[in-house]
Image: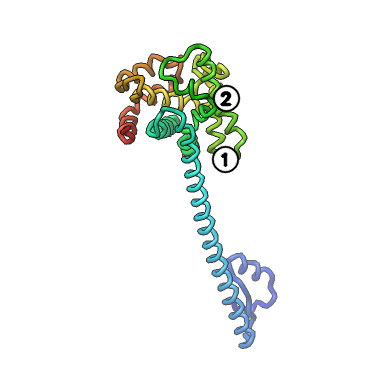
Amino acid sequence: MITAAGDDENIHKKAFDLGVSDFLSKPVNALVFEARVENLLSNYQNKILLESKAKLLESEVEKATKDLIKREHETLKILGKTAEYKDPETASHVARVSHYSKLLAKEYGLSEKEQDLIFHAAPFHDLGKVGIEDKILLKPGRLDEDEFEIMKTHALIGYEILKDSKSDYLKAGATIALHHHEKFDGSGYPKGSKADDIHIYGRIVAIADVFDALTSHRPYKKAWDFEKALEFLQEESSKHFDPDLVDLFVKNIEEVSKIYNSFIEA
């Protein structure tokens, strides 16, 4: 701003408030004018340079963060396969349970972050089975009472394996491992928790896990059709399962069917 106002502070203040960067008083000295302009240009260029570097840094940080998340997801998939080597359940079962769980989480109103957590953590629901001896885990027939008591310990084993992790995904996996065999009426295990005392992740995965087990073929049983499996969920509503989640699952059966058909077992 070129002004004849001299050192009038009020004018200077108003000018600065309006965005003026510098002042020249009349009469203008050519050398001072040139120096001031060069300084302003230099400051502007430095500002543009800093903004460009900031954007570049932000882009690099975003890229690095995406790479870290991608690697963590890959690690989760590898760890999720651990139980599969001892458990007769298939990779298709694990994939469907993850997708069913994410669908229920979305319909229940959980945030996108929690939907992502439960999707990647659901495969760890039976991780504790790695601690169950093969003669029980792989027994083709019905377990006797003592064997079943041993089998039930897999919920706590999975929790103990995962609980101290710093990863949000693995901590969610610990929660799911501990809660997915609890029942809404308090008759489940390992703690006999009931209703809202059962973590929502556990209530969700319980439905996804049981429904997929019922509708999947196993060497010891034929797959149930959807109608029969849904009837079972509804019969067990408020007993084994959260009634609100059962209603949401039934309501979204078309989406459930799409997920099922996307992971047909060979």
The residue at 62%/68% (across/down) is 16
For the point 63% across and 87% down, the residue is: 31
Colouring of the image: rainbow
Q: Considering only order in the chain, which callout, 2 or 1, is on the residue closer to the N terminus?
A: 2
C-alpha separation, residue under disc 1 versus residue under disc 2: 19 Å
Q: Where residue 157 appears, x then y in whole percent?
A: 57, 27
Q: Is residue 170 left or right of residue 108?
A: right
Instruction: Find disc 1 in the rendering and name its residue.
Output: 167
At 52% from the left edge and 51% from the top edge, which residue is drawn? 65
Res 88 quadrant in image: top left
Q: Quadrant of the N terminus?
A: bottom right
Q: Residue at x 34, y 19 (%)?
A: 221
Residue 252 location, x and y as percent? 34, 28
Amino acid type shown at disc 2 = Leu
Mark 2 Cα-neighbour bin, 10 Å: few <14, some 14–19, many ≥20: many
From the viewer's perspective, is residue 171 above or below residue 178? below
- Tell me if mark 1 has few (under 14), some (14-19) or many (20+) residues whose alpha carbon lies within 10 angstroms of its own: few
- Residue receiving disc 2: 156
The single residue placed furthest to the front in the displayed view is 135
Residue type, numbered disc 1: Ser
The spot of residue 236 in percent (x, y) is 41, 15
Foreground mark, 1 or 2? 2
Q: Is residue 143 left or right of residue 54?
A: left
